[in-house]
Image (cartoon, rainbow, N blue to C red):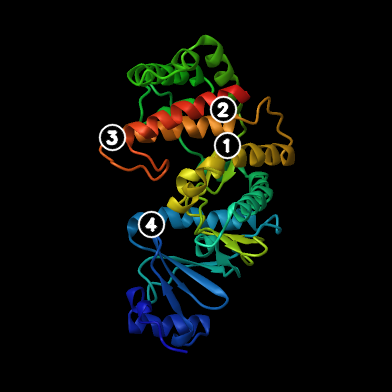
Amino acid sequence: MEIDYGVSGVLNYIQLEKFCKRFNLLPNQIKANFDGWRKLVLYTDKLIFLFPRDPRGIEWLEKEALAYEIMDISGNLPVPKLIERVSDKEISYYDFVVVTKIKGTAYARFEDEVDKQDVHRMLINLTQIIPLWHETVLEEDQIKILKVPSKKIEIISLGNWEQATLNPDQVENSLLYLQGVLEYWGNKFNFHSTDLLISKAIHLKWSNCLSEIASLKHVLIHGDIHEDQILLESKKSMTITGIIDWETVKFANPIWDFDFGEWGLKIWEWREFFSEFRREIWKIYSDKRKIDLKSFEGLDLFYSMRELLWVLKTPEKEYFPITGLDYEGSIQYYLEKLVNISEKI
């Protein structure tokens, strides 16, 4: 087995010698992965060693270790198991974390080969697993560490609309703001259903859907699920063997673990099926968690509104990967989509 010289980007030769001695390893058994934004990873066939990339990554890594510690209690979650937190200045200036390595291949490796049915099966399998960690019971001190601070948004804007909408006390105002945006662009394009999108009747329907979502009980969430974090047994089975990289763990609204906005561009090639996918996974999820929703369109409604606001925030882009259209075409795409969703509520 050849030596991976990328390991020297984490440990110098003296540190590596001590590292190998402590964990009973040979240098050629260790590989390096520098893909993470906040951490550097060394790994063997059985173990993963997580190091902060710089001081800013220390807090994130500690939260990730806490997540593994919390979920290990249930014993049935397909996530890495925490082996130990290591503080040894002779090996690393920063404390690091050791976890088990989960077998499987990242879904990202298959994205160039999948068809609609493959994507559908993967999302259904993922939705069967998400409730396992959403139903994890947290202690008060753990909630305090992982809870996302919330405050009332005084002035709702393109940049904070989603935070306002997920506050049950601000749903009405956030929708009034959105309807003002829709009125402007609908009139600009002489859109055929502008009056519908700004009507009191549609405001009431939207408010009922989004109020349900905003009022969902906060749970332990991954916060950054995407194609690189989902490990599969094979393309044929689409069976999920593990969910990794929990540095973005939070105690927050469960809706965030269904966010295609965290995914790369490939998932957006299936945008025409998003409404169908979201409707089905939201029904499966609510059934598994015994959540009584009046409409399964709420998930699609929230994210479609959010995606429209993404487009509006970036007028300088000539091409929008999330729609495959230009700026004005993308806006009209979402105006039409909001009409289609509203007809199903």
Which residue position is annotated with label 4?
57
Query: Tag 1 or tag 2, which sits nearer the N-term?
Result: 1
Instruction: Residue at 38%, 65% (x, y): give it.
Output: 94
The amino acid type found where label 4 is placed reads: Gly
Q: Is residue 6 left or right of residue 116?
A: left
In contact (CB < 8 Å): disc 2 and disc 1 = yes
The amino acid type found where label 3 is placed reads: Pro
C-alpha gap between disc 4 and disc 2: 40 Å
**Residues packed near mark 2 inside 10 Å, few (<14), some (14 to 19) or many (20 plus):** some
C-alpha gap between disc 3 and disc 1: 25 Å
The amino acid type found where label 1 is placed reads: Ser
Residue 142 location in percent, x, y? 56, 46
Outermost residue, bottom direction? 1
Which residue position is annotated with label 3?
315
Q: Is residue 73 visible?
A: yes
**Residues packed near mark 4 inside 10 Å, few (<14), some (14 to 19) or many (20 plus):** some
